[in-house]
Image (cartoon, rainbow, N blue to C red):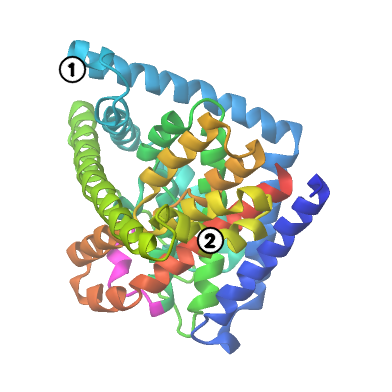
Amino acid sequence: MSDLALRGLSGLGFVALLGLAWLLSSDRRAVDRRMLGRGIAIQLGLAAVLLGTPVGRSFFSIVERPVAILIDVSEAGARFVFGPLLDVGPSFALGVLPIIVVVGSLFGTLYFLGWIQPLVRAMARLFTRAMHVSGAEALAAVANVFVGMTEAGLVVRPYLARMTRSELFSFMTVGMSTIAGSVLVAYSMILGPGYAGHLVVASLLSAPAGLVVAKLMVPETEVPETRAGADLVDASTAHNLVDAAAEGGLMGLRLALNIGALLVAFVALVALANHAIGAVGGLVGAPEATLQSILGWLLAPIAFLMGVPWNDAREIGGLIGVKTIVNEFIAYQDLAALVKAGAVSERSAVIAAYALCGFANFGSLAILLGGIDGIAPERRAEAAALGVRSIVAGTIATCLTGCLAGLFV
C-alpha cells in the first residue's frame, strides 16, 4: 500500500476505535458530544504540531539529549554498585532497572523543589476548560503523565472518595493509557536512539485520548464536586532536598523491584503457556503455535487499522496482545528485538511504540486497585467492578494514539 493509503487507514482506524468505545458505552445517550469534539480536536491538534511541523520535530532532538544523559548517569551509578558485572553482557536487571531508581530520585527532587507542580496545574486548567471535564479528572490525567497512576491518586486524594462513577473511571482509564516518567527513560533505553521523543509525545497524546474514551464508555450522569476546578495536593512527604531525593529513589527502587518480579513471573508463565500451546498445536499440525502468534492473528486487524502494513500486522498485533495480557515491558523488549532484526518496517515500529505506551494490563490493574484501597477504601469495590473496562478503555486510548502516529509520522 502507498504511504497515502496507509495514512488514510490510520484515520479510518481512529474513527473505528472511537466507534468501538461508543458501542461499549454504559449510556450512549449521556455522551457529552461537546467534550468529545473538543477532546478529539486537542488530540489532532497536538499530534499535528508535534509530529507534523518542523517545530514539533525539533522537539524530538531536544528530548533525546537529556534522556541520553540520564541513561549515562544511571550507568555510572550502577557501575559503582555492581562494578565489573556490567561488563559481563547486556542485562535487564543491571542495565534498565537502575534507570528507574535514578529517574525516581530525580522526579522526587523536582517535585520537592516545586518545578513539576506548575506544569501540572497549567495543563490541568487547559484540560478543564478545553475538554469540559472536572478539575479532579484533569489533575489526575496530567499527573499520570509525570508521576504515574499510584502517585496521581495521591495528587487527588481529597477528591477520590467523592468522585462520581464517571470520574473514577476516567481516573483509572488515564492511568492505564499513560506511562510514568520514571519508566519512560527505561523504555527509551530498551528501544534505542530515536524513540525517546516518540514516547514523550505518546504519553502526552494518550492523556486526552484516555479522557475521551472514558467519557464515551462511562459518560457523566452526575454533577462532579470539582466541576469548576480542583486544587493540586502536594504528594511529597519529604522534609528537605536530600530527603526528597532519597524518598524518590526508594520509590523508584520499589517500582523497579515490582517490575523485576513481575517480569520473572510473567515471562515464565508465557513460556509455560507456549509449551502447552505448542503441545496442543502439535496434535493438529501446528507445533510452532505460540501465545504471541495467536494474539497476533486475533489483533492483526487492529494493528492494520492503525496504519501498519498488513505484512507487519501480525507481529504488531501480537505485541499489543502481549502488552495487554502480560505487560508493556515485555512488549517493548519484543519490539526492540523485531527492530534489531529488521523484521518490521520503521513505520510499523513507530506506530507500535505509540500503541504500547500505556499501563493497560492486569498487573497494573492490581497495583491501581491497591493504590485506591489505600486512599479511598470505600471505592475499591466499585473500582474493581470497573477494572476490566478500564483495561479495555486504556488499550483503545493507546491504539488511538497509534492511529495519530500513523496519520502524521
The residue segment tinted magenta is: 154-165
Which residue is tagged 2? 297
Which mark is on residue 82? 1
Foreground pick, 385 / 327: 327
Is 155 part of what is drawn in magenta? Answer: yes
State which tag comes first along the sequence, 1 or 2: 1
The amino acid pointed to by label 2 is Trp
Q: Is residue 41 above or below residue 264?
A: below
Residue 64 in sight here: yes
Of 296 and 260, which appears nearest the observer? 296
Q: Quadrant of the C terminus?
A: top right
Q: Which mark is residue 241?
A: none
Identify the residue at horizontal 41%, vertical 73% (top origin): 389
Decide if residue 405 is on the left or right side of residue 327.
right
| Three-letter residue code for mark 1 | Phe
Determine the CA span between mark 1 and mark 2: 42 Å
Q: Quadrant of residue 264?
A: top left
Look at the image and tell me whether residue 127 can be seen.
no
Q: Residue 334 occupies which quadrant of the picture?
A: top left
Per the image, label 2 sits on a secondary structure element best described as: helix
User: Where is residue 159 shown, x and y percent of the image?
Assistant: 32, 67
The answer to whether residue 371 is above or below residue 78 is: below
